[in-house]
Image (cartoon, rainbow, N blue to C red):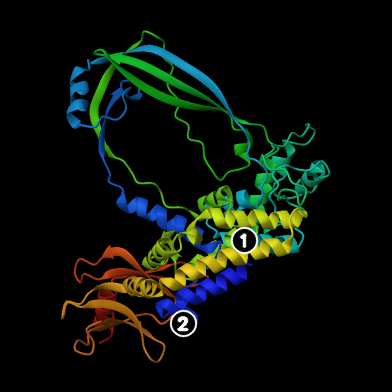
Amino acid sequence: MDLTWGATLTRFLSLSAGRVGKSFLSVGRVQSPTLALLVGREKEIQSFKPKKYFEVEVELENGVVARHEHGRFETYEEAQKILNSLDSVAKLLDLKSIVKKERPPIPFNTTEFLRAATSIGFSASSAMSIAENLYTNGYISYPRTDNTVYPASLNLKSVLKFLSKTEFREYVKQLLGDTLKPTRGKKETTDHPPIYPSSPASREELSGKEWKIYELVVRRFLATLYPPCVVECKQAIFESGGEVLKAYGTTLIDIGWRAVYTYSKISENPLPNMGVGDEFTILSSKIVEGETKPPPRFTQGSLIKLMEKLGIGTKSTRHEIIGKLYERAYVHGNPIKPTKLSFSVIETLEKYAPSITKPDMTRRLEEDMEKISRGDAIPDEVLDESRGMLSEVLKTLSMEREGISEHLRNGVMEDSVVGICRECGSKLVIRKSKKGGRFIGCTGYPECTFSLPLPRSGRIYVLDKVCEKHGIHHLRIYTKGRKPWDLGCPECGYEKWKSENC
């Protein structure tokens, strides 16, 4: 089903855009709504208009930093009025305290595992590939699972026993002899258990990346068996000149599961001992200016979580879909930023065949396929429904082929534009030579022959940053298996090379 959708739509859009061979435009039943999420978020960021705000902040003689209870003021004048009202001292009116217990994390299913792995520097596809190798070699359980509840058949103490002979022994000691009460997630299935370590391993027998993934699985497993992390949260309420100021503090009482799951830190900010009625000299007071921020770009982890929520893809395919978006040059970086090409593709689909970009259709088909696996639906009926949907989409696209072709070709061109030629005013674009090399050339050719060399290998992305001297966008080179290389301004780089070699 997916092959039919992908091959049919990819062929149509690629031919419409004049992109054939290795440069084809990839479209898919799951890929396109995923890309639409990224483009939609990028449009939110681009249209976001930051607003300034102002907060009143004071520092007391005992080291406490407090802010006015109102929080953010829209104008500087409002904040200044409050600042002028303050006395030289602040009196403690109330001191509230609450003890909070932070529950340990739930067991790893595929989504939670990939979110955690991407947060420590892995791509989703790389993390899954390594996890599958570890599973094949018997180090961890099957990594493709929806389950977040350990089954009764899993002998947790047996796992702890072999872990007690590894470098994690000190963490295991805290659990031996106790009644184990693992955390439970909301998803309980019977296909496979959550991901857990299935045999001991050492740093010496695994590669560096394999060890990091194995260690992540072990630490998560142990964390699910640990007690809660306990913190005391305090709120101090002061009065000065008729205005109310508030300060907050956090004190760690019991580190609990955070002792073993060390991938996130808890920041302590304890308040000093104080009594209601105490007065403190205000050492300094000021207005803190800030600016509202746009919504953040998706990370691979947060995108996988949203895909799961919207029913886009499955536990086994989401990381592959994200990997394809990178391979097809639709996105780059992490957090993920879509390219101009992806804008062109999604805007075209949203205009002429919007159903392809919505989660609803792909979710419905995913649900139908799930019904087939349970024996609740007839395969031929689901396939007929899928073919009918695809036929309608293709019919709509075919009627608008001319408009689609123009829109896509313009988008493809814009994705390769790096600046304006200062010799003739035409656009400078990334081009390929007959010998397979790449260069920056002027669209005014042959009248204008301005050009700049580019590296032969790696995928090139045009960044937003523009060289102040030459007016050319900075470039970034991505090569598989290596860290991205910021080439910067290609003309600055060429001038430097000439000065050193000529």
**Picture quadrant where residue 93 is located:** top left
Image coordinates of residue 25 in percent, x first then y, are: 46, 73
Q: Is residue 433 left or right of residue 492?
A: right
Image coordinates of residue 481 in percent, x first then y, are: 53, 70
Q: Of residues 201 and 316, which is closer to you in this image? A: 316
How crowded pointer 1 is (Cα within 10 Å; few <14, some 14-19, many 20+) is rated as: some
Question: What is the CA distance from the residue labelled 2 to the residue labelled 1?
Answer: 26 Å
Image coordinates of residue 42 in percent, x first then y, are: 38, 55
Q: Secondary structure at mark 2?
A: loop
Q: Secondary structure at mark 1?
A: loop
Q: Which residue occupies the extreme top position in the image?
A: 277
Q: Residue at x 53, y 54 (%)?
A: 359
Q: Of residues 204 and 383, which is closer to you in this image? A: 383
Q: Is residue 391 above or below residue 184?
A: below
Q: Earlier in the sequence, mark 2 or mark 1?
A: 2
Q: Of residues 374 and 274, which is closer to you in this image? A: 374
Residue 20's tag is: 2
How crowded pointer 2 is (Cα within 10 Å; few <14, some 14-19, many 20+) is rated as: few
Q: Is residue 359 left or right of residue 44?
A: right
Which amino acid lies under the numbered mark 2 shown in the image of this protein?
Val
Q: Residue at x 66, y 49 (%)?
A: 109
Q: Is residue 361 above or below residue 240?
A: below
Does the image show residue 201? no
* Residue that numbered label 1 is attached to: 317
Q: Is residue 320 above or below residue 190?
A: below
Residue 178's tag is: none
Q: Residue at x 29, y 80 (%)?
A: 497
The C terminus - image quarter: bottom left
Q: Is residue 212 left or right of residue 301?
A: right
Q: Residue at x 41, y 58 (%)?
A: 39
Image coordinates of residue 294 in percent, x first then y, are: 35, 46
Mark 2 vs mark 1, foreground winner is: 2
